[in-house]
Image (cartoon, rainbow, N blue to C red):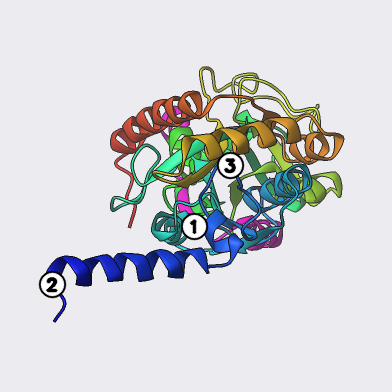
Amino acid sequence: MSTPFSFFSRRVLLAAAAVMCLPATVLAAGDPGTWPKAKPITWIVGYVPGGSVDVITRSVAKVVSDRIGQTIVIDNRAGASGAIALQYAARAANDGYWLITVPGPIIHAERQPALGHELSAVSLISQGPIVLVGAAANAHSNLQDLIGAMKKNPQDWSYASSGTGTGQHLAGELFNTMAGTKMIHVPYKGGGQAVTDVVGGQVSLGMLGVTPVLAQINAGKLKAYAVTTPFRLASLPDVPTMSEAGLKGYEATQFFIAAVPARTDAAIIMKLNKAIAEAMKTPEVKAALEAAGQVPSNLTPAEADAFAKSSITKFDAVAKQANISLK
């Protein structure tokens, strides 16, 4: 009869032998020394294809894929203002083969996986404005005229965003607070359908990212009243900032952060950070960011995390002041 010690020893030897027989790709998973050769990387996007989050992620992922020599697959998991994607990413393996683009600022009705907790920041990809647009067919001449009309008939005005609690929703409520208007929020799963409904007049206005509205602005189907950042855009040089248009002190910046599941190896995070930083310098990514009205960034993971927390703190206060319903 085997003693407990000899039985345990044989089990250890068998387990070790089984591990030695595993394919090299399995052994390499999560190893910063061999990453990223084990398998393709999945990059999650919490919104439908065609919006700013999706377009920017795809442009960056393509260049990063070329730089690291590994396939990157974009996985769109839209819904609940990005919460479905956040939950999915938080459950993913922390082996370096899962990424998610976290747009911000976003505030959810219930706590969701967050940077610094279930997720770890890799890099601040970019930051930029939201654009206040309306159908060109019945547009007002400027922002002040628009605000006047909104105050005269407050019940007639609504605005579209890419989802409840998103930066676009918060930008609209900040506008209501500062302009003294009462626009009703109409959330969408992404910018594409929202633009269609604003052009068609189903929704009065849109607080939307640059990517889905730019073509319609240039085609004369949408009127751009103002951008929400303190600076104008190269792609919309004639569109004033909110402050320039008369809403002094208004500022709302949306951003995109690349993140991974928490406890991903720090060496892998830094390799991803470096690859993304290199991607920011390429002509194709610069062009995609400019078209989206975004300014490239180059922060460390710790700096990106601090940036996101500061923005969320600011807009959490905006939500409370405006008594925003997130349900």
Relative vertical location of residue 227 with respect to residue 120 in this rendering, above or below:
above
Q: Is residue 128 visible?
A: no
Name the spot of residue 95 as percent of width and height, x first. Answer: 49, 52
Name the spot of residue 144 as percent of width and height, x first. Answer: 61, 29
Instruction: Decide which of tag 2 and tag 1 comes sooner along the chain.
Output: 2
Instruction: Decide which of tag 3 and tag 2 comes sooner along the chain.
Output: 2
Magenta-colored span: 177-201
Pick the front one: 28 or 278? 28
Relative vertical location of residue 56 with respect to residue 75 in this rendering, above or below:
above
Q: Nearer the viewer, mark 3 or mark 2?
A: 2
According to the image, label 3 marks what residue?
A: 33
C-alpha gap between disc 2 and disc 1: 67 Å
Q: Is residue 306 visible?
A: yes
Q: Nearer the viewer, mark 3 or mark 1?
A: 3
Label 3 close to label 1 by CB (< 8 Å) = no
Residue at figure coordinates x 39%, y 33% from the top left: 312
C-alpha gap between disc 3 and disc 2: 40 Å
Question: Mark 2 falls on what kind of element?
Answer: loop
Mark 2: amino acid: Thr
Q: Nearer the viewer, mark 2 or mark 1?
A: 2
According to the image, label 1 marks what residue?
A: 187
Mark 3: amino acid: Gly
Question: Mark 3 falls on what kind of element?
Answer: loop
**8 sits to left or right of 85:** left
Q: Tell me the quarter of the image containing the C terminus.
A: bottom left
Label 1 neighbour load within 10 Å: few <14, some 14-19, many 20+ = many
* Count of all numbered marks drawn on residues in the image: 3
In the rendered image, residue 10 lying in the magenta stretch gets the answer: no
According to the image, label 2 marks what residue?
A: 3
In the rendered image, residue 198 lying in the magenta stretch gets the answer: yes
